[in-house]
Amino acid sequence: MIYLDNSATTKPYPEVIESFVKVSTDYFGNPSSLHGIGTQAEKLLSTARKQIADLLKVKSAEVFFTSGGTEGNNLAIKGAALANQNRGKHIITTSIEHPSVMEAFQVLSEQGFAVTYLPVDATGRVSVVDLEKALREDTILVSIMHVNNEVGSIQPIAEIGELLKHYPQILFHVDHVQGIGKVDLSLADAGIDLCTISGHKLHGLKGTGVLYIRQGVRIAPLFSGGNQESQFRSGTENVAGIVALAKAMRISLTNCMLYTHKLKEIRTVFYHGLQEIDGVQVNSPVDGAPHIINFSVPGLKSEVLLHELETEGVYVSTTSACSSKKRTASKTVLEMYRNQERAESVIRISTSFHNEIEEAKQAIDAIGRAVAKLEKVMR
Amino acid sequence: MKFDHIIIRYGEISTKKRNRKAFVAKMRRHILWSLKDIPNIELTANRERMYIILHDADHKEVIARLQGVFGIQSLSPALKVERDIEKIKEAALYYMNQLSDPVHTFKITTKRADKEFPYVTNEVNHLLGGHLLRNIDGLKVDVKNPDFNLLVEIRREAVYLTGEIVPGAGGLPYGSSGKAMLMLSGGIDSPVAGYLSMKRGLEVEAIHFYSPPFTSERSRQKVLDLAAKLAEVTGSFKVHIVPFTDIQVLIQKQVPDNYSMTTTRRLMLRLADQIRERNHALAIITGESLGQVASQTMSSMFAINEVTNTPILRPLIAMDKLEIIDLAQKLDTFEISNLPYEDCCTVFTPASPKTQPKREKVNYYESFVEFEPLIEKAIQNIETITVVPNQQTIEKEMEELF
């Protein structure tokens, strides 16, 4: 099996699962309970929070646990917009965000917020100049992803942060779900106010995530309840998942330092290999994130190609997993190339530190065979 | 170009005469400790100043660490360059560009110790000033009240540039004033009192009264977390945890409600004094602030203080609560202190403690009770824990989960 769908989800590290099982079995207490069993759970929670804060180079009090990327993005965007709407109702994002950002903006626009969607160029990047032009007196929030989940384009977050430092009334949210552990980003230097991270994209478990909320930033909670997580996110904490997340993040960020060059080599193999296959168009920019390669085979339905590759033991995805069931064209690729056919025949390869160069070569061969075979049948 | 040394100015130490050497030695030890994991650092000292020779170390990191060292009045990063006007120009521009605060106006003060240098003082000022004005946008000269004064010292062996003055922590070198015991409750005040005492050169150890099951593991942990913050000053911090349950229960039973608080404090102080003696300390520090609570009225303190003639240091005595909170926030202890766990002072607080207790009365009530054996037992069962900064006080088994 060659698993190349790591941007959908990663395989948890075995030691992460060990931690999860051990905490669930031996330290099952509710961290809010006052007795000793609860105290132990709380200790685990605060240790995890400290470890994650250290890894992100932020303060413990700025780390909030969520159920993952979707919740983090919703909490950040809706929470920031609703808590600050008295100062203005204009919010800005890009046209290539993940559905959990897009839909949150959609909901807010139905509630009377004015939304500006920034376009991207053919490399899948927004321009800082466009952003500056879009800023208004009543702008209160800018939300821009770090690494695009479909094509891997890297947004100029540091430059945007630099620009927004001149507008202290505007909160800056970054969806860092695809970026963390792959492309460096300093939350403090980039002036980020809110940042979403998901556990299962870095070999942790599904249902875990972190929202960074800079000290001093107020957001409205989405849930009413027991006021856990400093009232920003009520609900009994998923202690086992959170401990597992802390461990997964530690291992992934270490791997990031040690093995990013390997990811880059694998990406180069794909990048050149794919370009040599007849009928294949690579969509990802040359300087994109090291773990995502997106390509199209215009005229071939992507789902058919995906299943053909599956018979060869190669697992890839069509657009992002979250949109794949809708059978629509890739919005990101459409934005970049303005070509419907190209956007409808998209395949995404996403790698992890577990992949090898040899696998990339085998996958290229399999893609070559599959494309040749299907083109014969379908045309 | 890189900063090659840092000038350290002494604060109050410079007013010491024959004892200066001992103070400087303490401060030197503290400085070396705080820089111990930075390789190739060199330290030299003379009567008025110390110099850190940086070699390859990052000057910002070194300065950040030195700002925590007591006894340092101020710090300045400095550049050493050849006696070549072009090199000096380059260095002056570099110095201006690395300043963290924005500078709009400046002046240059040149000291020409070496009279053989080919340019006179005024010429040097003009040459350097002109160079800076040409290369930095929006910069202006203001000789009367500049944002920044660049000092250029021309000596026979080299030329030195400095001028940025970074404030130090002040105070006296750690340990130069002897040792004292801090009564650390877990509240907002006592860690601040501990910090201020350390700043005056005291070596500090803490005493904490622990009353399980009335107070929980969490309140004990809270105290250790506070101690870990104080440990950031010196690398480690000792906490003596005194089992206090039996004594509190006995007081509760034997002393009338409105006097139980006074007696509790008196017993804490008696215990603290014995622990102080065993640890060769010469004073007890408390976080008391006048009038804040019933035990901190003048009458209360008068009644409580009767049990010892050891100096009781109260660094916060004249401070307002908001001032104390402000300091606690700067020390990063406020959030820990604010955690809502019961401690030994809150569990047994009577509904209306006497704010004007009388010595005679409290002595009378205590005369019926034999506290000595319990005091002896508590002293014997003290648990002493040494905490270090950022200590993860979790068990080995838990550690493996991360």
Image (cartoon, rainbow, N blue to C red):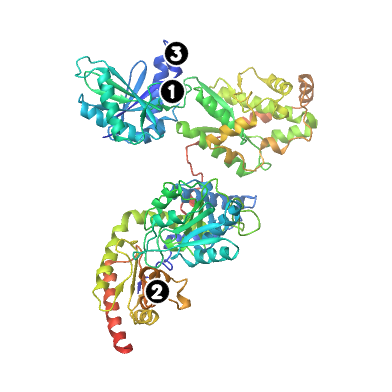
Amino acid type, residue under disc 3 in the picture: Thr
- Can you tell which quarter of the image residue A123 is in? bottom left
Relative image position of residue A58 (x, y in whole percent): 47, 47
Who is closer to the viewer here, A368 or A295? A295
Residue at coordinates 35% horizontally, 22% vertically from top-left? B50
In the picture, the quarter occupied by the N terminus of chain A is bottom left
Instruction: Name the residue at the top extreme.
Output: B18
Relative image position of residue B129 (x, y in whole percent): 30, 27
Q: Are marks 2 and 1 on the same chain?
A: no
Q: Is residue A212 visible?
A: yes
CA–CA distance in space, label 1 to label 3: 12 Å
The answer to whether residue B6 is above or below residue A249 is above
Q: Is residue A238 visible?
A: no
Within 10 Å of disc 1 (Cα), the crowding (few <14, some 14-19, many 20+) is many
Q: Secondary structure at mark 2?
A: loop
Left or right: residue B183 versus residue B78 is right
Residue wearing tag 2:
A317
Which chain is indicated by disc 3?
Answer: B
In the picture, the quarter occupied by the C terminus of chain A is bottom left
Who is closer to the viewer here, B338 or B222? B338
Amino acid type, residue under disc 1 in the picture: Gln
Which chain is indicated by disc 1?
Answer: B
Relative image position of residue B153 (x, y in whole percent): 28, 20
Q: Which mark is residue A169?
A: none
Residue wearing tag 3:
B15
Which chain is indicated by disc 2?
Answer: A
Residue wearing tag 1:
B73
Within 10 Å of disc 3 (Cα), the crowding (few <14, some 14-19, many 20+) is few
